[in-house]
């Protein structure tokens, strides 16, 4: 069975074709970051990873629709960067994905990056389906577990196993500006890896600053995200 995932009633594949809600010229300008040399990842796969991350980040930054556990709707962000795809991050992700080892890398094995991993225990889907499944699983931590309304990443949040949100917070961390990912068919399962820079999950800091949407952007704001 192939997996199809929906955001606000629209299939992710359709969102990619639509530029994830970004104006056409702006979306095309961003596509130069997809020109990595590794043939094991297609431009379409890179676009799915980048644009799905940005669509979800924009949704929470606008503060209108993303459910935050039992705390209601997650509040808007004053500054959240639009991510660009990063070829170095992809190289680290690909190197790890090919091992099929199901474990996070040690920090010195991914210098400058933090990592999300996902194991999909089936190969009855496409690599694109596995990618979509991973991102929606990570993001679903917000709705299923939630984080305090001031978006503070406290020691208690970091240490909690019962209410773990650390995969969501890496996706949503305000100053994560670069992402690169990989998908590996490991025979009986798919292994999905994404690397983030600078990484987020800094204890004592905020996932993002709560306030008027884009009020701290230094430049253009598109769909709740600050462009750079």
Image (cartoon, rainbow, N blue to C red):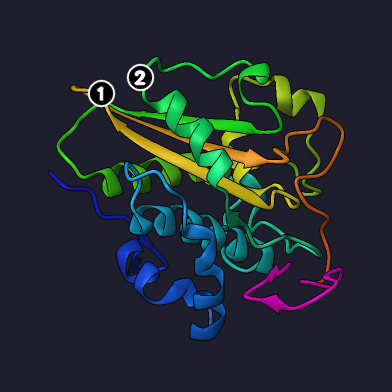
Which sits in the foreground, 91 or 178?
91
Q: Secondary structure beneath disc 1?
A: loop
Q: Residue at x 75, y 45 (%)?
A: 207
Marks 2/1: CA–CA distance: 6 Å
Horizontal placement of 125 versus 61: left or right? left
Q: Nearer the viewer, residue 40 or 158?
A: 40
Q: Nearer the viewer, residue 47 or 189?
A: 47
Q: Residue at x 64, y 55 (%)?
A: 72
Query: Mark 1 sits on what residue?
Result: 186
Secondary structure beneath dot 2 equals: loop
Is the magenta region chiefly helix, strand or loop? loop
Task: Name the residue at 73% across, 40% down.
Answer: 198
Which comes before the other along the chain, label 2 or label 1? Answer: 2
| Span colored in magenta | 213-228
Find disc 2 in the rendering and name its residue: 100
Which quarter of the rendered picture does the C terminus lie within?
Answer: bottom right
Q: How many marks?
A: 2
Q: Are marks 2 and 1 in contact (CB under 8 Å)?
A: yes
Residue 129 in picture, x, y percent from top left: 27, 47
In the image, residue 80 sits, relative to residue 18, either above or below, namely: above
Reply yes or no: does residue 90 show up in magenta: no
Query: Relative to 90, is 7 on the left or the right?
Result: left
In the displayed structure, 81 sits above or below 170; it is below
Name the image quarter holding the N terminus.
Answer: top left
In the image, residue 210 lies at what x, y percent? Answer: 82, 58
Residue 100 visible somewhere in the drawing: yes
């Amino acid at each position: 069975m192939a997996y199809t995932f929906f955001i606000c009633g629209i299939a992710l594949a359709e969102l990619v074709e639509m530029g994830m809600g970004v104006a056409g010229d702006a979306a095309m300008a961003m596509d130069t970051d997809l020109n990595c040399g590794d043939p094991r990842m297609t431009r379409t796969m890179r676009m799915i990873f980048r644009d799905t991350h940005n669509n979800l980040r924009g949704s929470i930054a606008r503060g209108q629709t993303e459910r935050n556990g039992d705390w209601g709707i997650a509040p808007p962000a004053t500054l959240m960067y639009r991510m660009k795809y990063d070829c170095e991050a992809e190289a680290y992700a690909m190197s790890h994905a090919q091992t099929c080892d199901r474990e996070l890398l040690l920090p010195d094995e991914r210098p400058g990056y933090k990592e999300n991993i996902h194991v999909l225990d089936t190969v009855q889907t496409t690599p694109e389906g596995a990618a979509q499944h991973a991102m929606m699983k990570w993001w679903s931590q917000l709705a299923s577990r939630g984080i305090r309304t001031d978006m503070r990443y406290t020691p208690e949040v970091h240490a909690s196993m019962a209410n773990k949100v650390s995969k969501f917070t890496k996706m949503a961390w305000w100053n994560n500006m670069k992402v690169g990912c990989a998908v590996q068919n490991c025979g009986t399962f798919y292994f999905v890896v994404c690397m983030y820079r600078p990484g987020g999950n800094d204890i004592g800091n905020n996932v993002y600053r709560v306030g008027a949407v884009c009020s701290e952007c230094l430049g253009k704001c598109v769909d709740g995200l600050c462009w750079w």
